[in-house]
Image: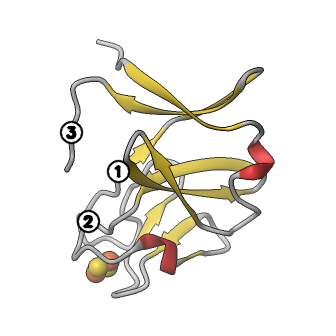
Amino acid sequence: MAKEYNWHRVADADDELAAEAVITVQDVAGKKVCVTRYQGELYAFAHKCPHAGAFMQEGYIDAVGNIVCPLHRYKFSVKNGRNTSGEGFYLKTYPIELRPEGVFIGFEKGWFSW
Ligand code: FES
């Protein structure tokens, strides 16, 4: 079954959200979500690391498109949250859509993480 999303408008235009490899924190319907840009595309992901809760905006984006956690340096793909350094965790990611009326981040319907 296809996933359904509740879409939340976060900006007028995509260049307001994050410069290349910069991680910003957005308030999306009362939840904090990190946004970054990698190779020109925007990506959204969880504000806290799934390992021990570090704030992901204090990490960085490496040259091959991983978010690197600031605390223990676990790596997660910006594209799908896969834990590319192999510890078996998964970083929640969110779809971003650029529409004529602005930039939207989607939360899966029925999903509550905190
Ligand atoms: S808290 Fe992120 S890797 Fe440990």
Marks 3 and 2, the one that precedes in the sequence:
2
Task: Identify the residue position indicated by label 1 in the image.
Answer: 92
Q: Against 44, is 4 above or below? A: above
User: Amino acid under label 3?
Assistant: Phe
User: Residue at image x 36%, y 87%?
Assistant: 71
Left or right: where 14 falls relative to 75? right
Q: Residues within 10 Å of mark 3 (few under 14, many from 20)?
A: few
Please name whichever residue, 72 or 35, is drawn nearer the observer in this view of the structure: 35
Q: Is the residue indicated by label 3 positioned so its CB lies within 8 Å of ligand 1?
A: no
Marks 1 and 3, the one that precedes in the sequence:
1
User: Amino acid under label 2?
Assistant: Pro
Label 1 residue SS: loop
User: Residue at image x 40%, y 23%?
Assistant: 6
What is the x, y in percent for residue 69?
42, 78
Label 2 residue SS: loop
User: Residue at image x 75%, y 43%?
Assistant: 14
In three-dimensional space, the C-alpha distance between marks 2 and 1, rounded to whole angstroms, equals 8 Å
User: Amino acid under label 1?
Assistant: Lys
In the orientation shown, which residue stands out farthest toward the top? 1
User: Residue at image x 76%, y 56%?
Assistant: 39
Rendered-image quadrant of the N terminus: top left
In three-dimensional space, the C-alpha distance between marks 1 and 3, rounded to whole angstroms, equals 12 Å
Asked whether the beta carbons under mark 3 and mark 2 sit within 8 Å of each other, the answer is no
Q: Is the residue indicated by label 2 positioned so its CB lies within 8 Å of ligand 1?
A: yes
